[in-house]
Amino acid sequence: MTKVAIVFHSGYGHTAKQAEAVRNGVARTKASPILIPVEEADNHWDDLKAADAIIFGSPTYMGSVSGEFKAFADKSSKVWFEQGWKDKIAAGFTNSSSLNGDKHSTLQQLSLLAAQHGMHWVSLGLMPGNNSSTGSNEDLNRLGASLGAMAQSNADQGPEHGPIPSDLETAAHLGERVATIATQFAAAKKVAA
């Protein structure tokens, strides 16, 4: 069975809600998801090693990944030194209170982390939503990302109010896409072996 790890940080619960949506998308396939908050990552290095895919998630704070996620990324240098994640599938997601909020910068940092580990990055694979006179906030990919899943949550409201359903479904789409590609990739590796 394909294993997909979702390693994330959530400062206020919004990105955790997005991570759960990613997990739900993975679960739509026959893959097995595991949620790993970065605060618990030290107990899960073996799970990350065993995963066929790792999906990284962080809120966007000041145009960047959170400090807590960056600390996890820095700790992964031991894995990098041994090339322990090389050829795994990777993807990413982020959330902030602004519609833009420089979320793209966070996704770039997550993809660069994956690239340094020699991983294969999976894009969102959706056309932009909410970009025409007939579009709406209910469209998948309403924030128009390509590199990963973006979500927006109001700064003055808790996770019970956001991210909105379309952002969560966009995150679920990413999880399902990654799990499907990881399963295909694993099957191709077996045939080639």
Image: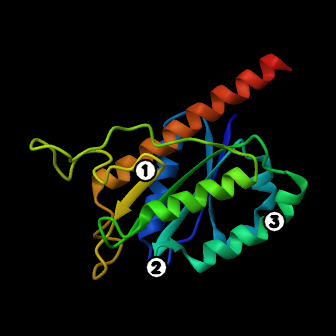
Badge 3 vs badge 2, beta-carbon distance below 8 Å: no
Tell me if mark 1 has few (under 14), some (14-19) or many (20+) residues whose alpha carbon lies within 10 angstroms of its own: many
Residue at horizontal 28%, vertical 79%?
157
Q: What amino acid is at disc 2?
A: Met
State the CA–CA distance, disc 3 to disc 1: 27 Å
User: Depth-wise, is mark 1 or mark 2 nearer the camera?
Assistant: 2
State which tag comes first along the sequence, 3 or 1: 3
Image: 121 above or below 71 = above
Residue at horizontal 29%, vertical 54%?
165
User: Depth-wise, is mark 3 or mark 1 nearer the camera?
Assistant: 3
Residue annotated with mark 3: 77
State the CA–CA distance, disc 3 to disc 2: 24 Å
Q: How is the image coloured?
A: rainbow
51 on left or right of 112: right
Question: Which circle marks residue 171 in the picture?
Answer: 1
State which tag comes first along the sequence, 3 or 2: 2
For the C terminus, which image quadrant? top right
Q: What amino acid is at disc 3?
A: Ser
Residue at horizontal 88%, vertical 59%?
81
Residue annotated with mark 2: 62
Name the outermost residue toward the top. Answer: 191
